[in-house]
Amino acid sequence: MELGSVIKKNSTKLLLIVLDGLGGLPVENNSTELEIAKTPNLDKLARISALGMHIPVDVGITPGSGPGHLGIFGYDPVKYQIGRGILEALGLGLEVKDTDIAIRGNYATVERQNGKIIVKDRRAGRISTDENRRITQKLARAVQKIDDVELILSPGMEHRFALILRFPYPLPEGSEQIGDTDPQREGYEPITPYGKNESSEKVAKVVRKFLAITENVLKDEPRANYVLLRGFSQKPKIESFLERFGLKACAIATYPMYRGLASLVGMDVIKLEGSSIKDELKALKDVWENYDYFFLHIKKTDSYGEDGNWRGKVEVIEEFDSLLPEFLSLKPDVLVITGDHSTPSVLKGHSWHPVPVLLHSPYVLGGTCERFTERECLKGELGMFPAEKLMNLMLAHSLRLAKYGA
Amino acid sequence: MELGSVIKKNSTKLLLIVLDGLGGLPVENNSTELEIAKTPNLDKLARISALGMHIPVDVGITPGSGPGHLGIFGYDPVKYQIGRGILEALGLGLEVKDTDIAIRGNYATVERQNGKIIVKDRRAGRISTDENRRITQKLARAVQKIDDVELILSPGMEHRFALILRFPYPLPEGSEQIGDTDPQREGYEPITPYGKNESSEKVAKVVRKFLAITENVLKDEPRANYVLLRGFSQKPKIESFLERFGLKACAIATYPMYRGLASLVGMDVIKLEGSSIKDELKALKDVWENYDYFFLHIKKTDSYGEDGNWRGKVEVIEEFDSLLPEFLSLKPDVLVITGDHSTPSVLKGHSWHPVPVLLHSPYVLGGTCERFTERECLKGELGMFPAEKLMNLMLAHSLRLAKYGA
């Protein structure tokens, strides 16, 4: 059900700690990363908390970071989709506004043949990130505005970059409906972008002008002499945390993508000094009095999982465990520790497996699990539930949901 | 969510073994059939596999064989419904085509009273199956074609038969909308069939001609001197396994109904020599190189359950267990062992109880269950999930689902 009618406010504080890619599979001695890690503090907390598993998007579905986070933020990740261009821009630390069209770009190598432009290398030989920076800067200097549209360019890894077209006025829905210019195959011409409706054709016109300027600016580059554009997207219309849950929310995260995702749902993104868990804890303490809801994101569990480095993942879990008492000393009314999806080291990537959840609050049964591990969470009182319902549980345990019906 | 956008292909092999009506309830010493059975091979497999329970249609709902199988094949059994006439025809081993109307028939006894035809016995005194065969043959010989419509008749058990009207052209949707001719009560006249729209009236016209001929052919029969028709139905429009999941699929089943159900979703039905589990295993080995997905159906667990013969059901489970190592020797990338529904011997019929599921793959936790029984499956890592999601799990564990979102 929609929560709107039962949301109420109080002065409780809700803390969501996301260890990215937390869940795993056996890596040694039939034990998972969470089982191998020495976690005396988590163990102690698990025995008096409510445990369970969440299913990020659907049974068997492996989520990207976008859908993974939207779920645990309480938004249906199938209903709310974040365009590729938006994610790319957020991942590079760009701010995205309601008046923006965000686009993923590739530098490419093209050749002129009989007056035609033919794509020879869709990735410009995977130029170095440094070369990318130089070229992007050159391009950004050459094209800052087209008509009344501001252009924001940001270099990514290797051949990738993000482009934002910032219009001086809000764009109607559907303004991003422009086909990719990338022909997806080498030996073909880039596709000229046209809008599929009146408002997107307005955007496409700017894109065509951008491409013409780009062609000229890059023409003497040995490799990156062209750009291909994909994933035209608008900032999704998502109710903010305050509107939806009545929560003044903030995000503490070191990676741009997660800071961006949090900002999409209206969380304030806290400035950080340093990128360790300790630094994040310090930032949390600094703003503890100012918010109702705190999203704290720990990236390295996922990074090591993706690398297949299970020992690294174990160490991050142990590092977090050692700091847990300090998190508890803030006395959050509801503390949840979970992941946005599983990243088993044996799979070296995100997976579809349900994700361990620990919910600490005075209003739980407890006593069902000995530790905070995948297998122990299966015995927990929260059972297995869709990620989207995690917010219901956090709000309920903070007594922020009124009775439904008389 | 719809899987379409994340389906990908690879060379993995998926094996679904369905022990029909597998789940049970305590029959002796508070133990179920699965608990009583000596299953050393299943026990061993259970310890290293992912276990859980599936809910065939909905909580508390007892499924027929059609919905039961559609669910574990990954189709919503409430959305996709198979008409009674189609099921009857499939059950008798008839092929059903897109141009067909399939109908369930009863032989009945009628009497003429003042020029009216009155149903005296809706089942013609439950004539023997042999007598049914004789009468159906006589009828089939007399009426092979009406206008351009081919008629296919097949005798069933006792008074039942199936009739297929095969048109020379595809029929529009709704062509099966014709009311039953069976008045459902004795002492009443049979109902003359009329179509509810233009295309079904075309069909009804053929049916009325068939009834007139039948009346004449059967008029001297002592008991089966009339037919009543029910469940007019068209072959349902169902995406094939290949379209929906990208899987080249085949079915190994001894009973016509299950062979027919599999063919409805586009599986190739493999020819069998013999009807034992061993014969099915041999057929599986023979075609192992030719398909991606294999549905192997074992009927007798359900048959004994329906008879209330729990010892018989235990023996079938033990027989399957003894052959399990041979199934494993094929090295399927994903092996699932489950039922289409429960058939507890104490209920002598299908039931609504969740059905044990065992999923074997390298990408599972394992170590949560000691045996493959109802009570042990409750501790499993798959939890309790809708049958329809079993395909998601099989596809995910065979790495055939791409990441959703970035």
Image: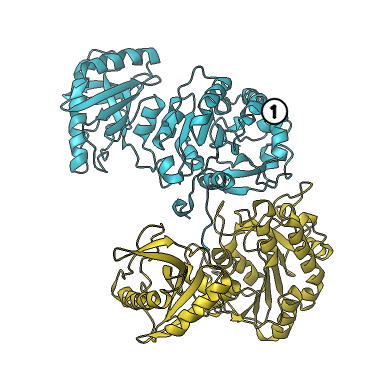
Chain colours: A yellow, B cyan
The amino acid on which the numbered mark 1 sits, given as a three-letter code, is: Ala
Crowding around mark 1 (Cα neighbors within 10 Å: few <14, some 14 to 19, many 20+) is some
Locate residue A178: give its quadrant: bottom left
The image shows residue A378 at horizontal and vertical percentages of 70, 53
Which is nearer the eye, B382 or B163? B382
Which is nearer the eye, A226 or B276? A226
The image shows residue B234 at horizontal and vertical percentages of 31, 37
Locate residue A180: give its quadrant: bottom left
Left or right of B265 on screen, residue B325: right
Q: Which residue is mark 1?
A: B37
Which element type, helix, strand or loop, lies under badge 1?
A: loop
> In this orientation, does residue A97 appear?
no
Chain holding disc 1: B
The image shows residue A73 at horizontal and vertical percentages of 58, 70
The image shows residue B48 at horizontal and vertical percentages of 71, 40
Q: Residue at x 62, y 65 (%)?
A: A390
Against A133, is B359 above or below?
A: above
